[in-house]
Amino acid sequence: MAVDFKEDESFASFVSRVAAANGTRSAQTFCQHMGLRFQALVDGDPTSVTRMLGLCRQSDKAFAVGVGGRDERTYRFGTETLLRSNLSRRHLRACPRCLEEDEAVGAGPTGSRAYGRLAWLPTFIRTCPEHRTYLAPLPDPVQFGSPHDFAARVRLARRSWDAFRDAATPAAPSDFERYIANRLLGRRHPPIWLDEFPLYAAGKLTETVGAIVNQGRNFITGHLTNAEWLEAGRTGFEITSAGPAAFADFLRSLHDKFWDGDGDFGGRLIYGRLYEMLAHENEDPAYDPIRILIRETAVASLPVGPDHRLFGVPSPRRWHSVHSATKEFGLHHKTARKMLAAARLIPSDDETANSRTLVDAGEMEAFIRRWQSSLKTDAARERVNIGRSSWEIVLKEGYVKPLIENYKEHGVAPLFPVDELDRFLARLEAVAPAGTTSGANFVSLPSAAKRVSTRLAQILEFLFEGRLDSAYTEPGARGFEAVRVSVPETILAWNTRQYQK
């Protein structure tokens, strides 16, 4: 005698019910009589499944989702994959009210009508959506061989049915459970981001996220109750079902651990159990998109650098903290803070810890490199080849700008970037190219100011406006003191300016 293999039934349940319908004591005994191994059928061995369905004249159901199949660590149901740890196969659970309805309206001998739903196997599902109760654990097998013998375990439950029924206490099913069931059974559902992951990864990620939100980032897995896991799935699904942007927001919400502390960044410190799961408990590439998203979010928000190997991978730097910059460039933190404030890269009155004061990494590195290569006043004058009094005028007129323009107000020493000095030299060379003209009428810029009885600033203005066409730089020389201008040409420029006034 055979029973009907239900669309949403596990194959182990089906075989068990066939055994019960034929009056045998256990599914193992029945299979032995048929020349089959019950465990092979439970594991979805294709040859054994084909033969069993042939005996039951239901060969057309060989590819039913409930048949499943397994390898060393995974179980496949249709297109979905679950891990052994995701399945409650030895500790079977059921909804007592569903079983009562099966017996009331089902076909076949009593004891073979109630069937085990495939959706009762994943640990991610804890409730019955029809009766809004928790699934109740079936009694452990006694005096028969296999824990997968569903009908035999229901038969044991009947000895204390009221207690079994009372164990299925009221509970509100979650959208997360509905999502897992729909995917497992191949039912259509609105596409979401989680669909990109294997079912086991989508479930594990969702529950972990929810448990962190509800219980804290360092929750202990074994301490959560069934009810707490139900709520973890519910909470987590609100985040993971909303897509990667919502997941990134969740990650950023965990950064408070960094901002509220004063230590260095650490993946485990910030992300807790989520990081431990992804970094230390498995190397499954199915989670790689999550690892990448965590790394990208951390880099975009925190002073993470190449020395922080998130999931074993060096991280590019998006932000520098004062601490990380001083460490990388060998600076004293007080000096660095003073200079950064003077450069308006950080607020001058900011009391945030050095490790929590952030500056865009590109801006920070560019400023520090410019700072470290800048010259003090004497070295800057030597590079430009200019006297002290002329140098003061050049600075006052803004032809050369110090690294920190208002350095006196900020209490820092004057420093002059090399690129700024070279830019000034290039301007001089552009208006006074190297030449060989000589004579008493060609003098240095300071001398020209004296000869014309005007300010050096005026001579520089004429020079850079292109009014001194015959200006040149003495061969083999360089810089300000090597520039020569024509006195008559300078007088003409001065007279022309006076006339225009």
Image (cartoon, grey):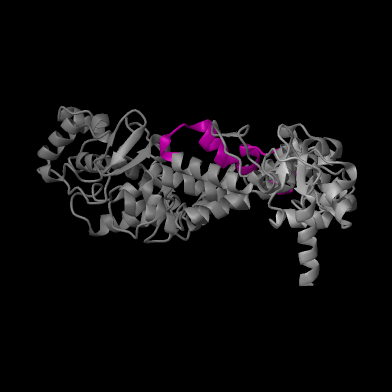
Q: Is residue 40 above or below residue 17?
A: above
x and y, in percent, of residue 79 in the image: 28, 44
x and y, in percent, of residue 37 in the image: 22, 28
Q: Is residue 228 visible?
A: no
Quadrant of the image occupied by residue 85: top left
Drawn side of residue 250 relative to residue 153, left or right? right
**Closest to the observer: 133 or 71?**
71
**Closest to the observer: 204 or 435?**
435
**Closest to the observer: 273 or 101?**
273
Quarter that holds the N terminus: top left
Drawn side of residue 98 relative to residue 14, left or right? right
Q: Is residue 144 above or below residue 172?
A: above
Magenta: main secondary structure: helix
Quarter that holds the C terminus: bottom right
Drawn side of residue 151 relative to residue 176, left or right? left
Q: Residue at x 85, y 47 (%)?
A: 446
Query: Which stretch did the figure color magenta?
Result: 258-287
Q: Residue at x 22, y 56 (%)?
A: 106
Q: Answer whether residue 281 is magenta in the image.
A: yes
